[in-house]
Image: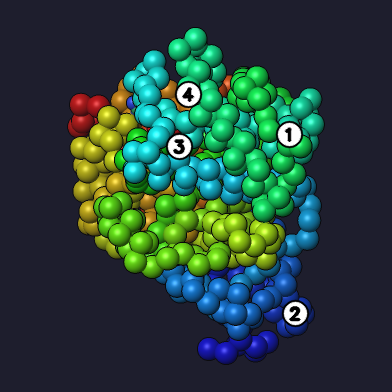
Amino acid sequence: MPLNSTTLVFRAPNILGQTRITNPKKFPASISVETWFPWSMKKTHQKRCFPIVSQLKFDQNYPSFSSSVMENERNLVLTSPGPDKYSKELDVAVRAVQMACSLCQKVQESLILKTSSPVLSKHDNSPVTVADWSVQATVSWILSESFGCRNVSILAEEDVQSLSEPDSSALLASVVKTVNDCLAEAPHFGLKGPETPLGSSDVLEAISRCNSTGGHIGRFWALDPVDGTLGFVRGDQYAVALALIEDGEVVLGVLGCPNYPMKKEWLSYHHRYHRIISKLTPTTSESWDKGCVIYARKGRGEAWMQPLHRKNKPLSWPNTAIPVRVSSVDNPALATFCEPVEKSNSSHSFTAGLAHTVGLRKEPLRVYSMVKYAAIARGDAEIYMKFARTGYKEKIWDHAAGVVIIEEAGGVVTDAGGSRLDFSKGMFLEGLDRGIIACGGAKLHERIIGAVDASWNSSSL
Ligand SMILES: Nc1ncnc2c1ncn2[C@@H]1O[C@H](COP(=O)(O)O)[C@@H](OP(=O)(O)O)[C@H]1O
């Protein structure tokens, strides 16, 4: 269907309800969108005008992008409304996450080739690598430089304890080198790097500065430098997650997914297959063949995706971004649900029972890390379920960025009791009812929430 003023088709599926164009004739170069949020069970009319970019322009900008996400959504591409609140924060956060992804790719490659970077164990036996500390130091340094040390408060996963021990000098040296190598690339990402390389004490300080305790008042960043470290060390999926939380609400989220494949079907392929394919098809500048950064600001009703930045040209912002939307599939038989790879992180038997009750027919898509949130936001899967063992306390940095991105892409995220996740109580998601459920649409979400109690009573979780 050609795109002109009389045949406009706006296909923004499911922004937590219905979206429709009002008065298309009134705005020849833009459209007004009215959205009903069933969320609050009342009609909240959000009227926004979006300038329209033609299909032709999109194709010129992204000739190599053929993800199914966009194949269904390419009738109309919306550009972001002008700058507003949190635009500087978003700009810096996306650039910082792009840099972090580049850092992680190098460390992951060295892990796979076994050229360096040992995998260590934390006190809870979870793995940690040079990448975790290096990303935390890099992002902390960039945020502090961009907004001023005193204005930046960060709550992040890693501490400096094991790095500061007397026998950790080689590890610390490796982190310092990785951070400096990364910061030396800052100008390629449109950021200023340090005038002289950071010393060990600067790096340790940048990591330990991330000691915010969060809470319901004021503003802080939540950072998971490498989410899904197990996937990372296995050469598989992982994510860099950065969110800004203000007065207990997530106002901005950025998710870097360096191994997210171009075709959604490839998400379920073994990571060794991806490596063979990427060797056969060398990456070109800013191609979309693998890896993306997805981001959203609260209340905008839109989420965006950029390809991973390659260093041979400066990061152009925000022109390389395209919008992402959740899937419009609401038939359980056609829906794909994702869950953690590790049974110890989420009960596969419980989700299997739930899936059966709800009528989900497809095999679960097991993916490491917050890439699962990205998959829902991109419309590559419809449902994400996580049911951790009783007693496990979910950390806010494992969810904040993903939640705001899914919500703004038109989806819904709650705990298993149907309540919104509470990011205002410190580092943990306090009061979480059993598990986490994220869906592309409200209808699927309601069905799953409705089935949880029955499944719960008949399970031994
Ligand atoms: N026993 C457990 N139950 C549930 N989640 C756990 C867990 N142990 C660790 N996790 C969290 O699950 C994340 C990995 O997610 P997934 O299982 O979806 O790949 C880990 O992130 P890190 O790797 O950043 O520590 C960690 O935060």
- For the point 20% across and 37% down, the residue is 349
Callout 2, which amino acid?
A: Ala
Indicate the secondary structure of the residue bearing disc 3.
strand
Indicate yes or no: mark 3 CB to ligand 1 under 8 Å. Answer: yes
Indicate the secondary structure of the residue bearing disc 1.
loop
Labels 1 and 2 touching (C-beta < 8 A): no
Mark found first going from the N terminus, 4 or 1:
4
Q: Which residue is identified by label 1?
A: 196
- Horizontal side, residue 126 vs residue 240: left or right: left
Mark found first going from the N terminus, 4 or 2:
2
Question: In the rendered image, is residue 347 in sight?
Answer: no
- For the point 74% across and 68% down, the residue is 49
Residue 306 image point, x, y percent = 57, 59
Nearer to us: label 3 or label 4:
4
- For the point 54% across and 56% down, the residue is 308
Q: CA distance from mark 3 to mark 4?
A: 20 Å
Mark drawn on residue 29: 2
Q: Which residue is identified by label 4?
A: 171
Indicate the secondary structure of the residue bearing disc 4.
helix
Closer to us: 306 or 329? 306
Mark drawn on residue 227: 3
Indicate the secondary structure of the residue bearing disc 2.
loop
Indicate yes or no: mark 2 CB to ligand 1 under 8 Å. Answer: no
Give the answer, above or below, for where 415 lies relative to 55.
Answer: above
